[in-house]
Structures are given as C-alpha cells and as structure tokens.
Amino acid sequence: MGKQVALLEHGSAGFAFSSGLAAIHAAFSIFEPGDHIITGDNIYGGTYSIIHEYFEHWGLSFSEADTTREEALEQAFDAAFSQGKRVRAVYFEVLTNPLLKMSDVTVVARVAHAHGALVIIDNTFVTPLGQQPLDLGADIVLHSATKYLSGHSDVTAGVVATKSSELAEKLYFALNRVGGALSPQDSNLLRRGIQTLALRMERHQANAVDVARWLEGNEYVTHVNYPGLESNAYYALASSQLCTFGGVLSFEFDDRVDAEKMLDSLQLFTVAVSLGAVESLAELPCRMTHFELPREERLKHGITDGLVRLSIGIEDVRDLIADLDQAIHAALR
C-alpha cells in the first residue's frame, strides 16, 4: 500500500495507517518538545483536538494563521519568532472543512521554506487526482483514506507520503513503534477503492457543480461555498492548481429555514460526518464534525449554527436536487 501511495503522490515513500487521525499523529510525532507549528486557522476538528489535548502536553506549541493570505502567514512567523519560538512546520488543508477556502501551496511552501520550516498538507478533500502537493513544494502530504481514496464507506484508513528519506524514516518509526499500521484486509479494500478513484471523482464533481448551482439560485440559501462555482472567490486559483474541484460543498440558509430540521427531512442523503463516498452525505458541522471546537472559535471562523455541509455522491443528480428541495420546504419555519 505504501508504494501505491508514494506513486500517487509522486513521493519517494508512502505509509498506510489505521485511520486518518493516526496519520496526523504520525506527522506531528516527528517533532520534539519546544518545537512550534503554525496551523491553518480552519482545520479538521479531530486535528484541533489532538494538537491541543495531546501534543501540547508533550511540549509542542501551536499558533494559527490564515494560510490563504501570504501576509497573514508571514505575520504568524514574525509573531512566533518574536516570542523566541522555533517554528518547525506549517500544517494546513488545501481546501478547508467545511468552508472550502483554498490555499496556494506554492506560496505557503515558499514562505515556510524561507523560514526553515517544513510544509505538511492534509489533502483529503482534493485527492492525488486533483493535486500532488509534493510537486508544489510540500514536504509531507497526508489523507484520511477513509474518504475519497476508499470511496465506499467500508474502510477506516490514513495515508502519508514524503519525498525526503529522512522524513520517511521518522514516519516509519511512528508507524512501526506506535502500532497504527493498516491491516492487510483494509489495505486490499483501499487498493480496490483507488482503482475507481478517477471515475468516481468525475461523477462527484459533475454532480457537485449541478447541486452548487441549484443551491446558488435557491431563494432560501444566502451563499454557497464551492470552488467550482465561477462566483467563488477561489475559482481562479482552483482552476489553475486543481484538476478537480471535488464533491464537497457547504451552504447557509436564511432565517426562514431550520437547518437541523432540513437534515432530518432528507430521504436520499444520509446524515453522517464522513465524506467522499459513493453515497451522498449531509451534516451540520456545529453539531457533528466541529463539535470539539468551542462555539466562539467556530463562529470566529464562519462555522455558524446554520451551516450545512454536503458530500455529493454518484447518484442521479436530479434525485439529489429533488431530495434537497423537498427537505428545504419541509423545514420552513
């Protein structure tokens, strides 16, 4: 499995873990007490928890930066250095969850490397089909392979790839000593999922674009977050750096719709926290994927109580839109 991951990401070495969080743990475990890491200001809730509830207890320190803005990243480095901290890495997601903000990997890599820091990227939303961050300057790229790489909601897995033999040795140490290796059977299921990745992503994106455009024109929706929309602030960057916009989008209702009731009224969509599977999934980030974040922290980053995230599957898009339409009308206040 490791060789396949390395080939997909154009890396020299790859590793398969028992979960996405195990892969994230391995990436952070290469650092030493006293090291400082700058993270994106909108990261996966599980990542937020593991750095603040686990790694901080082991002597690592963290600060946040809006990695979509070069000046904000530079300011984060300046602030850390002014406090005498050793900044060893920048960790971020190419497309953030659930607001789909996009960072320019080449810019982040240039800034980080100029300050002697590594670049670690969670590329779960984009997949190796959409972008190979190692080619753009990243040092480590990881995925929750539970999502698109598997694609069938039947595997829990994580993968990591790097071009550096030195980093590969450190990642292997974490894999070998901590015991988070992926089982042979799950490795085989993951291999099977990767075989259909290109076909699935083509349908995921086509459906997502149609659903996003329909939501954008819906009278009850205030805004839609999806980089494949021409109206999106990140459309130009996504068009230049990504080969696929993916199948995840989020949107927010006006006060006339009860978002929680809307989810409860869905019939074709499954309400679940995962994403990237052949079936369409829906979730309320404030109650599900990002419940670990304090409410003030969520609101600061735009994750409101009425924000809905969809993972668009490969069903007939007409059925998906019809399901959303009936659920919205069922949830009118």
Image: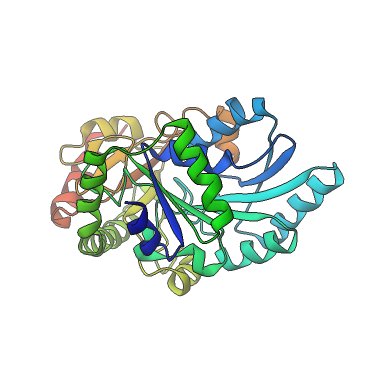
Q: Nearer the viewer, residue 94 or 172?
A: 172
The spot of residue 29 in percent (x, y) is 58, 38
- Res. 327 visible in picture: yes
The answer to whether residue 273 is left or right of residue 204 is right
Q: In this rendering, is residue 35 above or below 109?
A: above
The answer to whether residue 206 is left or right of residue 168 is left
Q: Residue at x 32, y 58 (%)?
A: 4
- Res. 223 visible in picture: no
The spot of residue 116 in percent (x, y) is 73, 58
Q: Nearer the viewer, residue 10 or 65?
A: 10
Q: Residue at x 30, y 51 (%)?
A: 148
The answer to whether residue 299 is left or right of residue 224 is right
Q: Nearer the viewer, residue 55 or 176?
A: 176
Its colouring scheme is: rainbow
Q: Quadrant where the C terminus lies?
A: top left
The answer to whether residue 241 is left or right of residue 294 is left
The spot of residue 246 in percent (x, y) is 34, 59
Q: Count the marks.
A: 0
Q: Quadrant of residue 126?
A: bottom left
Q: Residue furthest bottom?
A: 240
Q: Quadrant of residue 52?
A: top right
Q: Nearer the viewer, residue 323 or 1?
A: 1
Q: Residue at x 56, y 64 (%)?
A: 105
Q: In this rendering, is residue 38 above or below 9?
A: above
The spot of residue 37 in percent (x, y) is 67, 44
Q: Residue at x 27, y 56 (%)?
A: 211
